[in-house]
Structure formats: structure tokens, C-alpha cells
Amino acid sequence: MTIGEALRDAAVRLEPIGGTGRLDAVFLLAHAGGVSRQEMIAHAERRLDDDVAQRFAALVEQRAAGMPMAYVTGEAGFYGRMFGVDRRVLVPRPETEIAIEWAVRHLRAIGRENGSAADVGTGSGAIAVTLACELPGLGVCASDVSFAALAVARRNAARNNVFQHVTFLTGDLAAPLLRFAPYDAVVANLPYVPTAECAGPPDPVSYEPLVARDGGPDGLELYRRFLPDLARLVAPRGIAILEAAPANARTLEALVGQALPHAGVETIRDYADLDRFVIAVIPPANGG
């Protein structure tokens, strides 16, 4: 079988999964063969090696079963970098890159590029690692309740050459972070999917760990537990960035306003123009 024939057959098989059969096939064959997508396409007439064909067939089977591409290949892109992912962690979402943009911009604006940041519920470590990469002088602490997730996060820190710049802490929500508080930036992407939605029919998201998705009856249970500690986590002039489901963002904004009554609080939209993040900027100490 030639490369072109393998791609054509796989594309037909994968097209019902998201309507991107050809693109998925090219990605998977390049991954199986350890070569670039461009090389695969340019040499479509070349015969496919048996070992590559076997690896490719196994990957196609996983994808055809609905497994997200990131889990099939074991990696996902985020903010221009690659991160290892598996079923112990969520796949980083493109919209979460907005949190990075806000954090970096704010830290630069207040002259705290060499300050500190906290990533609450780090998962794959995408947020913590990216902050450390973007601001090499920044001290970053990242927490997660899952030992398994932290193992993935540590590998991603090493993969992106910032292992010495990120401190990984095991524990629930803010608890392990408080001993190093306050931070100039706090980013929290906590589970925010309502429990009833987590129990829906199988889909690509169902491959992701339930503990990283289930936000309780209304999707805000973990944020309600987290918010009483937020005032102690964020330094004067610092920023807190909390990701939420669009349906809950305005409710979360009100809750953050209650937790931080003197902060400037607003909801901002994601790339799809949906409410996604609640931003809180802490005023200077003593009004200075």
C-alpha cells in the first residue's frame, strides 16, 4: 500500500469523527512515521513500510473510536509549544491561551515580570509551564489534587526546559499554595462542567478524567470552595484570572466580587465571543 492509498482509506474511515478525516489521517500517518506532514503529502506514491502501516492502523482505530487526537498522539499544542497529554489530564484548550495573554500583559504592566504566579489545578501544567516560558524570571507555583496529573505536569516542565522554575505542589485548591502567598498573578481553571452534563452520552470529552471536569451540580462547586482563600492568594496590584463555562461566568463574576469587594472585576469573552473568564485586579495597598 502506498502513502496516498493509506491516507485515502483512513480519511474515509475517520470522516464521520468530526468531519476532518483527511486532516486527521495526515497527522496520524506523520506521527506514526516520525516525519513531517509535508513529506507525507509530497511522497504519496511511496510504499508504506510495514511497521509504519501497523502503527498507523492502530492510531486510526483509536481515533475512529472517538478518542481525541491529542490522546491518540500523546501530545497537544498550547501557546506555540507542545505538551505531553494522556487520559490523566485534560487536553489544553485554545481559549485558555487568553488567560496567559492577560497574565503576562498585566505582570509586565505592573513591572512584576520577575514576580510570582500561581496555577490552581494545573493538570497538564500547560498554564504554569507557559507562564514560566514567557516570563523566565517569574516564580511559578502549580497545584493539583491529582498525583497522576502532577506527574504529567512535571514532565511537561522538563520538556519545555522550565523544570527549575516551577514548583509543583500536591493538595486541594488553594491549600498548598497559601504558604507561598501572595502571588502577583493567580490563574484558576477549575472543573466547571455541571455534573449532569458529565453524565451525558459518550463523546470525545468523555475520554478526559471526570475529576478534572465535574464542577458539581451547577458547575461552580469548586470555585465556591476556592474563593474564600482568593484574597490571601493575590498580592496588591495583582490579578486573578478564573476560567468558567459561558453559562456560569456572570454568576462567577458576582461571587468573585463578593470575595474581593475592593477589586475591579469583569467578565471577558473567548475567541468564540462567549463569556469565559472572570478577571479581578487588586488595588494597591493602602490605596497607593
Image (spheres, rainbow, N blue to C red):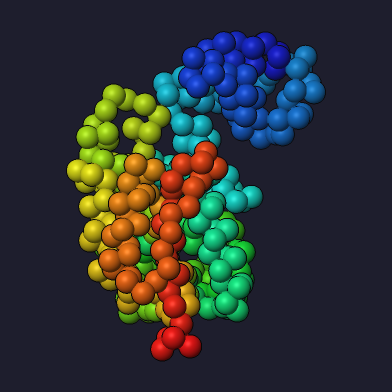
Whole-percent x, y for residue 67 in the image:
43, 28
Where does the N terminus fall, quadrant-wise?
top right
Whole-percent x, y for residue 157 in the image:
52, 60
Q: Is residue 211 visible?
A: no
In screen coordinates, is 35 left or right of 250?
right
In the rendered image, the vertical position of residue 58 relative to residue 236, given as above or below: above
Whole-percent x, y for residue 252 in the image:
32, 54
In screen coordinates, is 48 left or right of 277?
right
In screen coordinates, is 96 left or right of 176?
right
In the rendered image, the vertical position of residue 195 relative to residue 152, given as above or below: above
Task: Identify which residue is drawn at 67% across, 11% down.
Answer: 5
Nearest the viewer among 94 and 64 is 94
Residue at the far right: name it: 42
Task: Identify which residue is drawn at 54% across, 15% down.
Answer: 15
Residue at the far left: name it: 217
Task: Identify which residue is drawn at 62% across, 19% down.
Answer: 22
Task: Identify which residue is drawn at 48% across, 19% down.
Answer: 17
